[in-house]
Image (cartoon, coloured by chain):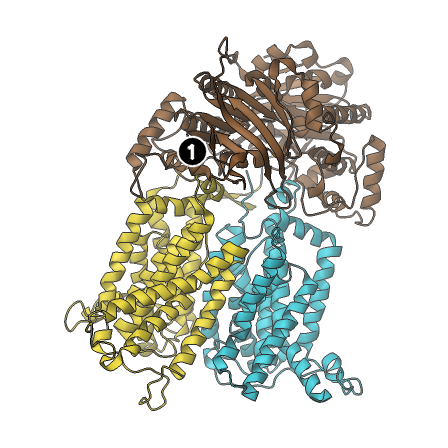
Amino acid sequence: MRIDLEPRAGRSRIAEWVAPVGALIAAMLIGGLLVAALGKSPVQAFFVYFVDPLTEAWSLQELAVKATPLVMIAVGLSFCFRANLWNIGAEGQFIIGGAMGGWIALLTHDGVGQSVLGSWWIVPAMLAFGAFCGLLYALIPALLRVWLGVSEILTSLMLVYIAQLFLDYMVRGPWRDPKGFNFPVTVNFDPVATLPMLAPGGRLHAGVALALIVALAAALVMARSLFGYEVRLVGSAPRAARFAGFSESKLTLAVFAISGALAGLAGICEVAGQIGQLQPSISPGYGFTAIIVAFLGRLSPIGILVAGLVLALTYIGGESAQVTMKLPFYLTGAFQGLLLMCVLAADVFTRYRLVIQTGRRA
Amino acid sequence: MNVQIIELVLVTIVTAATPLIIASVGELVVERAGVLNLGVEGMMIAGAAIGFAVAFLTGSTFLGALAAIAAGMFMSLLFGILAVGLAANQVASGLALTILGLGSAGLAGASFVGQKRESAASLYIPGLSDLPLVGKLVFGEDMFVYTALALVIAVSWFLNRTRAGLALRAVGENHGSAHALGLPVRRTRMLAVLFGGACAGLAGGYLSLAYTPFWSPGMTAGRGWIALALVVFSSWKPWRLLAGALLFGGATVLQLHAQAASIGLPGQVLSALPYLATILALVVLSLRNRRGSIAPGSLGTPFIPDR
Amino acid sequence: MIEAPVSKDQAAAEPLVRIRGVTKRFGSFTANDNIDLDLFAGENHALLGENGAGKSTLVKMIYGLIAPTEGTILWRGAAVALKNPEEARALGIGMVFQHFSLFDNLTVAENVALSLPRTESLKTVPDRISDIASRYGFALEPDRPVWTLSAGQRQRIEIVRCLLQDPHLLILDEPTSVLTPQEAEALFGVLDRLRGEGRALLYISHKLDEVKRICDRATVLRHGKVVATCNPREESARSLAALMVGSQVKDVKAAADRTYGGERIRVDGLNLPAGDMHGVSLQSISMSVRGGEVLGVAGIAGNGQSELFAALSGEAAARDANAIRFDGGAVGADGVTQRRRRNAAFVPEERNGHAAAPDFSLSENVVLSRHAESGVTRSGFVDYGRAQNLAGSIISSYDVRKAGPDPAARTLSGGNLQKFVVGREILREPGVLIIDQPTWGVDAAAAAAIRQAILDLAARGAAVVVISQDLDELFEISDRIAVIHMGRLSEAKPAGAVTREEIGLLMAGTASGDARAH
């Protein structure tokens, strides 16, 4: 017996939707086995993870808040991945964006520097500076690749560790709140340095709306603009892209800049909208989870919007499963890895037919 | 500095380099077969968790090491099904493996956090191990260190001297031609991936069985990624791997000693050294090879046999 | 169907290979349909057919690379089901591939060792290579890495690989397509000796002259079926061509009297270092092409053709802007898009992945080379409606056959995709056209249509450079022919005043008196 892959003639629209949904179901089934192996009820876990968070208003809002960084980062990554470039250091760009944007909040703490212009500019400046620093940080691996041909995969990943250590040093050292009883945290951001809420009393901050705008704009750019065409062409047929007259180097820098800026923006939104101060760790691995979001969303911004909500669900469900079912925290991570594997396997079936040959006619 | 301190430093460099050597020699074989498995970190941590668990429960370091190997191989099997069998994108599959490995290792090792056990014993040959300077270095290491060295020798011999090694290089160089010649491309790659998994698992096992006496969820700390960089740095040649790993082991030890000696630099800067060194090494290497890539020809490209 | 002329002793002898009713289907497509074929020891049997007629599929089944869907292959009278090429080789079947299955970074000896049975020792391989090479009269250094060798030398590795196993049947897939006429002569000598030793040869080709010269019998395939088995020496090239194609192919007609306009392409001392270590560097290339003129560039594969195309198209820009001029404007330092804006158009050799993106639809592929035109993009956004209209007019003007309204490029057959790609450029009415291997792997009807379109464009006043390895094609459509060898371009000579032999010598680099080349 041998198993062969036979290319399908065309890609069907239905398969594009069936594949990620099928992958999600497959991952849930395997995850259920895992839960059963831990001696807990898979059915109960399914409800705690995927149903309960959808039944209450506050947890729905929490879902949108958790999905926000995932969607922002994943939209940026989709540009890279479409162009066949592998920025896997979004976690680092997220941290740098959050740290540097938050720095402006620290500088303007207690009304400093607001005598002339007032305080209206602080939040926009934080967002812009956070995104800009994320962009610069992402350009390091991009430039090394363009200039010297260094693999962007390894350099972008190494820079994650360096970003984590940088933030750790800053909040334990220069940025520490002197009145914070030696806790490694900064002062709480002033209200003028935090993102406004979309509705009073709710949990939704302005970053949520920003993520939605980012996704819609990216969808338009990807589908209709010449730049979107360029990105898709470079990823699909690099030699044809050169023949089309597109510069691979410029495109590499551009997509890294976009994904770095969006990761940085996500970072500062998380800090200024959700956490409200800087601390040694500002991300539960959003930068890596966003890779899964990008693939589950089939690298399309609208798909990413949906996929971001699904992965946000695993975070919230995972937290309550820890409390109510005493399921280990790492179950969520294992499930996310499983999900990405299933998504990648399912994607193969949208492009190929599996042909199993048993024996052969002589 | 007296002889004893120099010897101590050298011994710690070797121990720091050992997991890098074991993991990267496995990945080197995988890449020579044309497959890029970015999941080394995930396979290592799985090996560390399962290895510690089994050693803790059975009391045997040897069984722990075997379990670590098995865990790494199981993880690599998943990757192999995806990237070799189904020809899925290798970069994404490797990332998935890393995420899955970190998660499931945390899951498997949850009940062992905070437990301690006796680390693997070092060799002791009366007389020889007591020789000044080289005694501990050459005759007083634990079994993992000797295994690492043996692996490098064996892999180098296999790749350059055996027919199977030649076939593996051919598969990595040009899978289309290899297939046309009737070489079993997918089987070769699958076996290479499994070997890589075994090595990564063993490297992880070393961390929890010999390097430290305990298991903790983030204990690989990017060593899997550094091992990947080392393979590039070695230009896919086993012996250069040894030199690269010792260099990195040196950077790690330097950082530890500098922190202990409190030379004024913040600890975080020193902790960042191995990662900075990795980037620097990749840059230096690409400066040296500006004329063209020396990577195996079909590295990272999925293979689908034509009809 | 013409009956097989089997000689008396062949009729008495058991055929070495007997193929009966072999069919191979890929999904709904039938590549081989109920094939019968006999191969005898001591004969050179030609397998003739157009691209896509099913020749490769058939030999892949004989060589064990793929399995038949139906039918039987008998080896010395016994049915065999070959699981892989290793089993085929164990029986005594060897194959020399068209695109060599060699490993560039391995040495000659390592390449040979890979195809030997596992029981053979690696150490004796170099000596055995030297033995074979001297027995058949050619040189081969076992320790050289393959990437340093010429195409002819590489082919010898393939042949040595096969001969080391002392095969009873040797399959050769288009063996002369990469050789100079002189190298081909040498190959024929080797083949004659092999046949004389009682081996069977299966010689795949579409070059009728060759087949008439060296083959004893020929089997002709068309659309996956055997349409005739004949003695090629008794057929005319024309009758063989008619069997292959099924109908008379229209002759390409050039305008009766050509009038040339002013100079439109001028290349002056163009130098371009090789992009990577396996590449060829271009050295002081000069040419001049007038409006209405077709300049043919002949040469053996790998002598700088793709580099020349890249330099002319702007994919690899030169340092000196003045090295290349289109219509008087210095474009040497410009990129592809800027050169297109000067009304130049380009068609590279490789359709899939270079001229077109295989996974993109045809209308998206229109954008590929025409995004700089007003109307196709507006303020950074693509007008896909306009692209669809353009695709529609290309498809109807060039009779592109396709399935569905706007299918992915990879679903088109080679000939249809090539017509689309050529049509995309020619419909722009360019003043300058650079085209590399315009009819490579294209069926005869499509090839004729493409050549006609090139000639018509030239007749309308464009300057055309055709780079091709097909000498027949160049003599058919060129006004002048130049030869590229190791990155140097010979002086162009009028096509009517130069012989194939002269061109052949230039291709081998022996006529120029330029002995420094090696």
Q: Is residue A333 visible?
A: yes
Nearer to us in this view, C362 or C101: C362
List the single residue furthest toward the top: C256
Chain letter of the cyan region: B
| Residue denoted by label 1 | C340
Badge 1 sits on which subunit?
C
Q: Secondary structure at mark 1?
A: helix
Please name the residue shown 45% across and 76% down the image: A165
User: Is B80 situated left or right of C485 in this image?
Assistant: left
In the rendered picture, chain C carries what hue? brown
Nearer to us in this view, C424 or B73: C424
Give residue B82's position: percent from left, percent from top.
50, 55
- Dot 1, crowdedness within 10 Å: few (<14), some or many (≥20)? many
Q: Quadrant of residue B16?
A: bottom right
User: Is B107 situated left or right of C501 in this image?
Assistant: left
Disc 1 marks which amino acid?
Answer: Arg
Please name the residue shown 30% across and 65% down the image: A128
In the rendered picture, chain A carries what hue? yellow
Q: Quarter holding the C terminus of chain B? A: top right
Give residue C467's position: percent from left, percent from top.
56, 27
Give residue C189's position: percent from left, percent from top.
78, 24
